[in-house]
Protein backbone atom coordinates (compact mmCIF):
# COMPACT_ATOMS: atom_id res chain seq x y z
CA UNK A 1 0.00 0.00 0.00
CA UNK A 2 1.36 3.37 -1.02
CA UNK A 3 0.98 6.31 1.32
CA UNK A 4 0.92 9.71 -0.24
CA UNK A 5 2.26 12.77 1.39
CA UNK A 6 -0.03 15.74 1.38
CA UNK A 7 1.44 18.50 -0.79
CA UNK A 8 0.63 22.11 -1.42
CA UNK A 9 -1.61 23.07 -4.22
CA UNK A 10 -0.56 25.73 -6.69
CA UNK A 11 -3.17 28.07 -5.21
CA UNK A 12 -1.69 27.71 -1.72
CA UNK A 13 1.80 28.46 -3.03
CA UNK A 14 0.57 31.57 -4.89
CA UNK A 15 -1.26 32.84 -1.80
CA UNK A 16 1.80 32.24 0.41
CA UNK A 17 4.02 34.08 -2.08
CA UNK A 18 1.59 36.99 -2.21
CA UNK A 19 1.50 37.24 1.60
CA UNK A 20 5.30 37.17 1.76
CA UNK A 21 5.49 39.96 -0.84
CA UNK A 22 3.05 42.05 1.19
CA UNK A 23 5.30 41.64 4.23
CA UNK A 24 8.51 42.44 2.32
CA UNK A 25 7.31 45.65 0.61
CA UNK A 26 7.14 47.76 3.81
CA UNK A 27 10.49 46.37 4.93
CA UNK A 28 12.06 47.40 1.61
CA UNK A 29 10.58 50.91 1.92
CA UNK A 30 12.00 51.15 5.44
CA UNK A 31 15.43 50.05 4.19
CA UNK A 32 15.36 52.62 1.37
CA UNK A 33 14.52 55.37 3.87
CA UNK A 34 17.28 54.22 6.21
CA UNK A 35 19.84 54.24 3.37
CA UNK A 36 18.77 57.77 2.38
CA UNK A 37 19.01 58.98 6.00
CA UNK A 38 22.43 57.36 6.34
CA UNK A 39 23.64 59.16 3.19
CA UNK A 40 22.38 62.52 4.51
CA UNK A 41 24.05 61.96 7.87
CA UNK A 42 27.31 61.08 6.15
CA UNK A 43 27.07 64.27 4.07
CA UNK A 44 26.56 66.42 7.19
CA UNK A 45 29.42 64.65 8.95
CA UNK A 46 32.01 65.26 6.25
CA UNK A 47 30.81 68.84 5.71
CA UNK A 48 31.37 69.51 9.43
CA UNK A 49 34.84 67.96 9.32
CA UNK A 50 35.79 69.89 6.20
CA UNK A 51 34.47 73.17 7.65
CA UNK A 52 36.51 72.77 10.86
CA UNK A 53 39.62 71.94 8.84
CA UNK A 54 39.15 74.94 6.57
CA UNK A 55 38.52 77.21 9.59
CA UNK A 56 41.77 76.06 11.20
CA UNK A 57 43.59 76.60 7.90
CA UNK A 58 42.23 80.16 7.68
CA UNK A 59 43.23 80.91 11.27
CA UNK A 60 46.77 79.70 10.62
CA UNK A 61 46.99 81.82 7.46
CA UNK A 62 45.58 84.96 9.11
CA UNK A 63 47.56 84.89 12.38
CA UNK A 64 51.01 85.97 11.10
CA UNK A 65 50.00 89.04 9.11
CA UNK A 66 46.31 89.62 9.90
CA UNK A 67 45.42 89.53 6.18
CA UNK A 68 41.77 90.08 5.31
CA UNK A 69 40.02 88.54 2.32
CA UNK A 70 37.48 86.12 0.94
CA UNK A 71 38.54 82.75 -0.39
CA UNK A 72 36.39 80.16 -2.18
CA UNK A 73 36.88 76.75 -3.68
CA UNK A 74 35.97 73.08 -3.71
CA UNK A 75 37.22 69.98 -1.97
CA UNK A 76 38.15 68.22 -5.22
CA UNK A 77 41.54 67.33 -3.78
CA UNK A 78 39.83 64.95 -1.33
CA UNK A 79 37.44 63.57 -3.93
CA UNK A 80 34.44 65.79 -3.17
CA UNK A 81 34.10 68.20 -6.10
CA UNK A 82 30.45 69.00 -5.32
CA UNK A 83 31.33 70.25 -1.83
CA UNK A 84 32.28 73.92 -1.93
CA UNK A 85 33.39 76.51 0.61
CA UNK A 86 33.65 80.26 1.16
CA UNK A 87 36.01 81.57 3.84
CA UNK A 88 35.98 85.20 4.93
CA UNK A 89 38.50 87.00 7.13
CA UNK A 90 37.55 90.53 8.14
CA UNK A 91 38.15 93.12 10.87
CA UNK A 92 35.00 95.04 9.93
CA UNK A 93 32.92 96.12 12.94
CA UNK A 94 29.81 95.21 10.95
CA UNK A 95 30.81 91.55 11.35
CA UNK A 96 32.05 91.84 14.95
CA UNK A 97 35.69 92.69 14.27
CA UNK A 98 37.85 95.56 15.47
CA UNK A 99 40.24 97.21 13.01
CA UNK A 100 43.83 96.00 13.55
CA UNK A 101 42.81 94.19 16.76
CA UNK A 102 40.15 91.52 16.23
CA UNK A 103 39.46 89.51 13.08
CA UNK A 104 36.33 87.48 12.42
CA UNK A 105 36.94 84.29 10.45
CA UNK A 106 33.88 82.60 8.93
CA UNK A 107 33.78 79.42 6.86
CA UNK A 108 30.68 78.14 5.09
CA UNK A 109 30.72 74.69 3.47
CA UNK A 110 27.85 73.44 1.34
CA UNK A 111 26.99 70.55 -0.94
CA UNK A 112 26.38 72.05 -4.38
CA UNK A 113 23.70 69.52 -5.30
CA UNK A 114 22.71 71.17 -8.59
CA UNK A 115 26.31 71.84 -9.65
CA UNK A 116 25.81 75.52 -10.46
CA UNK A 117 28.79 76.67 -8.38
CA UNK A 118 26.66 78.86 -6.13
CA UNK A 119 24.99 78.37 -2.81
CA UNK A 120 21.24 77.93 -3.24
CA UNK A 121 18.53 77.72 -0.61
CA UNK A 122 17.74 74.13 0.25
CA UNK A 123 21.31 72.89 -0.25
CA UNK A 124 22.80 71.53 2.97
CA UNK A 125 25.31 73.94 4.50
CA UNK A 126 27.49 74.27 7.59
CA UNK A 127 28.88 77.57 8.87
CA UNK A 128 31.53 78.02 11.54
CA UNK A 129 32.90 81.33 12.77
CA UNK A 130 35.47 82.40 15.32
CA UNK A 131 37.55 85.44 16.20
CA UNK A 132 41.28 85.96 16.13
CA UNK A 133 43.08 88.63 18.17
CA UNK A 134 46.06 90.45 16.75
CA UNK A 135 48.85 89.49 19.11
CA UNK A 136 52.57 90.11 18.90
CA UNK A 137 53.29 86.46 19.64
CA UNK A 138 51.59 85.43 16.37
CA UNK A 139 53.70 87.78 14.31
CA UNK A 140 56.94 86.81 16.09
CA UNK A 141 56.27 83.09 15.56
CA UNK A 142 55.78 83.41 11.79
Image: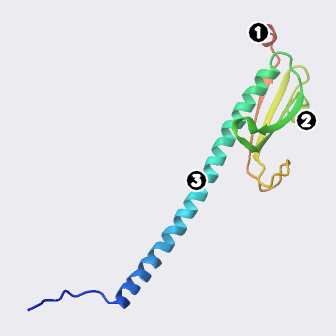
Q: Earlier in the sequence, mark 1 or mark 3?
A: 3
Q: Secondary structure at mark 2?
A: helix
Residue denoted by label 2: 94
Q: Residues within 10 Å of mark 1 (few under 14, many from 20)?
A: few
**Which circle, 1 or 2, is nearer the viewer?**
1
Residue denoted by label 3: 38
Calculate the distance from the C-alpha at mark 1 to the C-alpha at mark 2: 29 Å
Residue at position x 72%, y 37% from top?
A: 51
Q: Secondary structure at mark 3?
A: helix
Q: Secondary structure at mark 1?
A: helix
Residue at position x 90%, y 29% from top?
A: 69
The correct choice, above or below, for 31 with respect to 22 in the image is above
Calculate the distance from the C-alpha at mark 2 to the C-alpha at mark 3: 39 Å
Q: Is residue 114 left or right of residue 31?
A: right
The correct choice, above or below, for 116 with respect to 55 in the image is below
Calculate the distance from the C-alpha at mark 1 to the C-alpha at mark 3: 43 Å
Tell whether label 2 touches label 1 (CB within 8 Å).
no
Q: Residues within 10 Å of mark 2 (few under 14, many from 20)?
A: few
Q: Earlier in the sequence, mark 2 or mark 3?
A: 3
Q: Residues within 10 Å of mark 3 (few under 14, many from 20)?
A: few
In this view, the residue in front, 137 or 111, is 111
Residue at position x 56%, y 63% from top?
A: 32
Residue at position x 44%, y 82% from top?
A: 18
In this view, the residue in front, 88 or 25, is 25
Q: Earlier in the sequence, mark 1 or mark 2?
A: 2
Q: Position of residue 56 (x, y in %)?
A: 72, 27
The correct choice, above or below, for 18 with respect to 118 in the image is below
Q: Is residue 116 left or right of residue 54?
A: right
Disc on res. 141: 1
Tell whether label 3 touches label 2 (CB within 8 Å).
no
Amino acid sequence: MKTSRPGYSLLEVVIATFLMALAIIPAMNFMAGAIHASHELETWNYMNLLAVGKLEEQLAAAAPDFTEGTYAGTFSDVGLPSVRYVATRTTSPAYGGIADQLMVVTVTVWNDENGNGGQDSGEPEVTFATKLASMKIYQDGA
